[in-house]
Amino acid sequence: MSTYQWRKSSYSANSSNCVNVAIAWQKSSYSGDAGNCVDVAASDRAMLLRESDEPGIVLTTTPAALRAFICGAKIGAFDRIQEGGA
């Protein structure tokens, strides 16, 4: 299920002539029925991620960078970070 949020375009700066875009947030299918969900949205040039508990904090990345991160996580590239190793 998608929820929509209107966001001001970053190209509008502080101008009163703003362009607003609708962002369609989707809950990650891996979140299940848990209360701490990851929401994702796609815009023309970026992927947006946020935690449902903190919807005002949004991580913006490129599709390629997100793909590389997900691939790295799947093969365990970040396991040592979680364990506190170097």
Image: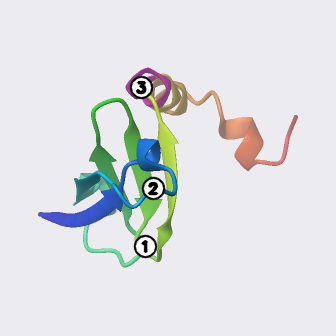
Which residue was labeled with disc 3? 67
Q: Give the CA separation, mark 1 to mark 3.
A: 22 Å
Q: Is residue 74 left or right of residue 7?
A: right
Amino acid on which disc 1 is placed:
Asn
Q: Nearer the viewer, residue 15 or 25?
A: 15
Q: Nearer the viewer, residue 1 or 84?
A: 1
Q: Give the CA separation, mark 3 to mark 2.
A: 34 Å
Between discs 1 and 3, the one toward the N terminus:
1
Which range of residues does the magenta coloring cover? 63-67
Q: Quadrant of residue 36?
A: bottom left
Which residue was labeled with disc 2? 15
Amino acid on which disc 3 is placed:
Arg
Q: How is the image coloured?
A: rainbow
Q: Is residue 61 above or below residue 25?
A: above
Residue 15 falls within the magenta-colored stretch = no
Residue at horizontal 27%, vertical 63%? 6
Helix, strand or loop at mark 3: helix
